[in-house]
């Protein structure tokens, strides 16, 4: 089901992008639009949004999650428009299905402008998916356990969490951080490991959910998770944040 959802998401995103590019070209160059084409475009957009799930970015603000989701079809849309304009400018023949494209009196200039626009969107996409992290991997690896917990608490705060409480050592009952977001209580366990993280932290945070009566739970690490840990987390609805995802979530604190 997971693979099927990803395939549906990819196909829907591509079809939406192509239809959006075709609809845009018709509207701009032919001063009209096809209602059937518009309906299909909206349908594929809905399918794309419904099937797009990425647990790594659950802790990000809603507006940034939306941008991450919508930027990919926007980049694909811009790419289709760019390829179409370049082909029309260089060969005089547009892509199949784009008969109304007009490159103006200077086809090469139009092609260059299209390439520049695509580069701008690709740069924005790269910025959104590769934000500057506050702490490098080396800095995280050098942190002591409590220091890493405090750092994770700061990252949570910067990502919209409130009422953040760092628990006290051995009496934490499996939760290093307790926080709230959108009225839901979260319990979080922080693991600064030099090796991969197994399924034990997932089991502990699952128990902490019951003890603290929390609705959501997560395990954050500077490392990676084993396959068993990922399967157990998926079965229990636990969010896993590895070192790469933590760096992407981090901001300058």
Image: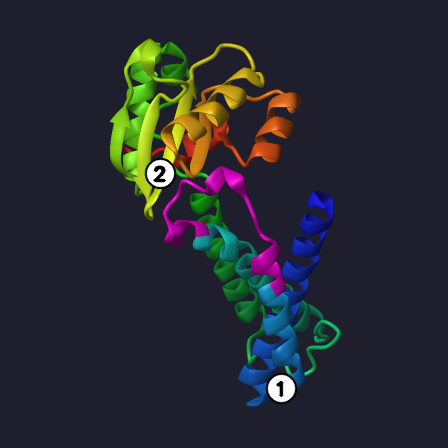
Position of 116 with respect to 79 (left or right) is left
Residue at 47% across, 12% down: 193
Q: CA distance from mark 2 to mark 1?
A: 45 Å
Which is nearer the eye, 112 or 147? 147
- Observer-side mark, 2 or 1, equals 2
Q: Is residue 198 visible?
A: yes
Q: Which residue is mark 2?
A: 185
Circles 2 and 1: CB distance less than 8 Å? no
Q: Residue 35: which numbered mark, if any?
A: 1
Relative to 250, say whether 5 is above or below.
below
Give x and y (percent) for residue 88: 67, 73
Residue at 32% across, 13% down: 171
Residue 207 is covered by the magenta coloring: no
Give x and y (percent) for residue 113: 50, 65
Within-10-Å neighbours for mark 2: few <14, some 14–19, many 20+: many
| Magenta: main secondary structure | helix
Residue at 29% across, 15% down: 147
| Residue 17, quarter of the rendered image | bottom right
Position of 98 with respect to 237 (left or right) is right
Magenta stretch: give its range. Answer: 47-65
Residue 53 is covered by the magenta coloring: yes
Residue at 51% across, 58% down: 70
Q: Secondary structure at mark 2?
A: strand
Residue farthest toward the bottom in the current orientation of the protein: 31
Within-10-Å neighbours for mark 1: few <14, some 14–19, many 20+: few
């Amino acid at each position: 089901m997971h693979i099927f959802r990803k395939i549906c998401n990819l196909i829907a995103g591509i079809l939406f992008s192509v239809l959006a590019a075709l609809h845009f070209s018709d509207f701009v160059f032919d001063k009209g639009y096809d209602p059937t084409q518009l309906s299909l475009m909206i349908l594929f957009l809905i399918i794309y949004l419904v099937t797009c799930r990425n647990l790594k970015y659950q802790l990000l603000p809603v507006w940034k999650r939306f941008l991450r989701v919508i930027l990919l079809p926007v980049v694909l849309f811009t790419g289709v428009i760019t390829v179409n304009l370049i082909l029309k400018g260089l060969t005089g023949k547009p892509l199949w299905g784009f008969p109304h494209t007009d490159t103006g009196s200077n086809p090469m200039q139009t092609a260059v402008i299209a390439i520049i626009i695509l580069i701008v969107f690709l740069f924005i996409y790269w910025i959104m998916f590769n934000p500057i992290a506050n702490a490098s991997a080396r800095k995280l690896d050098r942190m002591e356990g409590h220091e890493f917990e405090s750092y994770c608490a700061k990252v949570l705060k910067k990502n919209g969490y409130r009422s953040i409480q760092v628990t006290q050592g051995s009496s934490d009952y499996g939760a290093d951080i307790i926080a709230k977001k959108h009225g839901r209580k979260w319990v979080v366990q922080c693991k600064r490991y030099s090796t991969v993280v197994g399924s034990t932290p997932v089991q502990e945070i699952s128990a902490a959910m019951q003890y603290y009566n929390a609705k959501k739970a997560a395990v954050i690490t500077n490392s990676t998770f084993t396959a068993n840990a990922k399967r157990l987390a998926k079965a229990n609805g636990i969010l896993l944040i590895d070192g790469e995802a933590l760096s992407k979530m981090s901001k300058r604190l």
